[in-house]
Amino acid sequence: MPFRKPRLFLADKGYDGDAVRQSLLLAGISPVIPPKSNRREPIPCDFRAYKDRNRIERMFNKVKQFR
């Protein structure tokens, strides 16, 4: 089964850097990263897609609790 290329990169504010965003865009991946509060020009973020990151993180937390 061949792997498909990801369409979105869901990450937290720690990955809000121009270099990270640029490399993702060059690879054809849309970054879904909320902007840091100290960013001069806030970059828009798809917060609907960002909600999925939280769901995934909670699922991994539960898996870790019940291992």
Image (cartoon, rainbow, N blue to C red):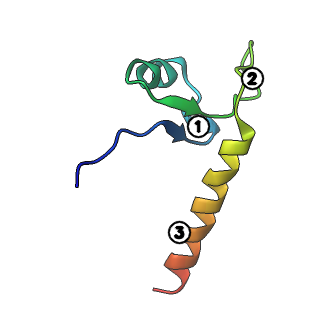
The residue beneath circle 3 is: 60
- The kind of residue on which mark 3 rests is Phe
Q: Amino acid at mark 2?
A: Asn
Instruction: Return the disc, 1 or 3, that comes first in the chain's sequence.
Output: 1
In the picture of the structure, the residue carrying the numbered disc 2 is 38
The residue at the point 52 percent across, 86 percent down is: 66
Front label number (1 vs 3): 3
Q: Secondary structure at mark 2?
A: loop
Q: Is residue 31 left or right of residue 25?
A: right
Residue under the image location 58 percent in, 60 percent down:
56
Q: Residue at x 40, y 18 (%)?
A: 26
In the image, residue 67 lies at what x, y percent?
Answer: 45, 86
Mark positioned earlier in the residue sequence (2 or 1): 1
Q: Residue at 37% across / 24% down in the picture? A: 27
**Residue denoted by label 1:** 14
Q: As displayed, is residue 57 above or below residue 65?
A: above
Q: Badges 1 and 3: C-beta atoms under 8 Å apart? A: no
Classed neighbour count for the residue bearing mark 3: other residues with Cα under 10 Å, few (<14), some (14–19), many (≥20): few
Q: Position of residue 64 (x, y in %)?
A: 50, 77
- Which quadrant holds residue 31? top right
Q: Quadrant of the N terminus?
A: bottom left
Q: CA distance from mark 2 to mark 3?
A: 30 Å
